[in-house]
Structures are given as C-alpha cells and as structure tokens.
Image (cartoon, grey):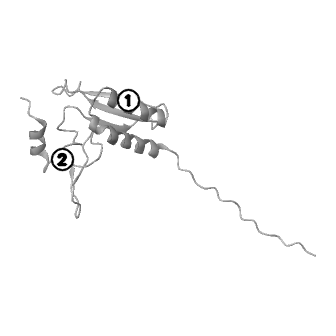
Amino acid sequence: MATSSHLNWLIIRNNNAFLLKKRDVKKPFSTEPNNLANVSSYRYSGIVHKKTVGVVPAADKKGFTTVLKKGKYAQRPAKNTVRVSFKAGPRRSLKKLKNLLTGSKYRKDLTQAALRRASAVLRSQKPVQTKAKKPSQVSAKKPE
C-alpha cells in the first residue's frame, strides 16, 4: 500500500537513523542519501519522495555522478535509481546537469541545490595550489 510523501515525512521527521542532532543547532542535519542540502527537511529528503536527486563524487575522483530516483519503480529498489556520470570539465558538466534537471522538468525545485552540490564536489577534486616561496636573496656585500 502506497502512502503519501507528506504522511511518510510526518512519521520519520523526528526519529530516523539518518538524523543528526547537535546542541545549540536549531535545525537538525541529515545524513541520508540523495539529500542535497544535508538538512532534515521535507523538501530535501531523499527517503520520502518518489523522485529525488543526489550528487556524489565519481568513483575515479574525476567529475561527479548524479543519482536520480524513478517514480515509476518506487516499489522496486533494484530498478529505481539511475546514475548519470559527468566528466567533461566543470563548466560543461554543470551546464549538462542544469539541462538534465530543467529540460525534463525533474524536480525543478532542486536544480539550484544540485548545481551547488556538484560545484562543491568539483571544487574538492581540484588540486590544492601551494604558493611557491621565492628563495630569499641574501645581499652579498662586495669586499672593497
């Protein structure tokens, strides 16, 4: 029997395995898969919705993979996820992700959050640039 996503959220919002509560933090965090903002809220929840978007680093640490959940196969966990890899460079990959989400009208409300997460993943894969220190020039006095 299928239940609505609102009812599911009301059941799991205060108690679930992915909830991360901290002292002096107003809104609890969430560690659930396909939660783009890592915030425990109905909008970003990857558990209760039939259609969700998740952005994870690619297996080879080059680019990112988008995980989409199909609403049609909600009761078949083996078939309900689709993985799309993006490795064509940062700007082109972000543009392709935006076209994928807005063109197919797949959770338009999560488009900006998905772009932010993908950008953060790409930024984390960049090599850290260290400033090369110039050798200090010691002025050698000429003997006169």
For numbered disc 1, what is the local secondary structure? helix
Residue 78 locus on image (x, y percent): 23, 26
- Give above or below for 10 relative to 107: below
Residue 103 locus on image (x, y percent): 33, 27
Q: Quadrant of the N terminus?
A: top left
For numbered disc 2, what is the local secondary structure? loop
Residue at 60% x, 56% y is: 131
Residue 34 placement, left or right of 73? right
Sequence-first disc among 2 and 1 = 2
Which disc, if any, is residue 99?
1
Splitting the image into 4 quarters, where does residue 64 fall?
A: top left
| Residue pointed to by mark 2 | 17
Mark 1 is surrounded, within 10 Å at the Cα level, by few (under 14), some (14 to 19) or many (20 or more) other residues, namely few
- Give above or below for 143 relative to 48: below
Q: Amino acid at mark 1?
A: Asn
Q: Nearer the viewer, residue 34 or 112?
A: 112
Splitting the image into 4 quarters, where does residue 26 fall?
A: bottom left
Decide if residue 59 is in sight here.
no
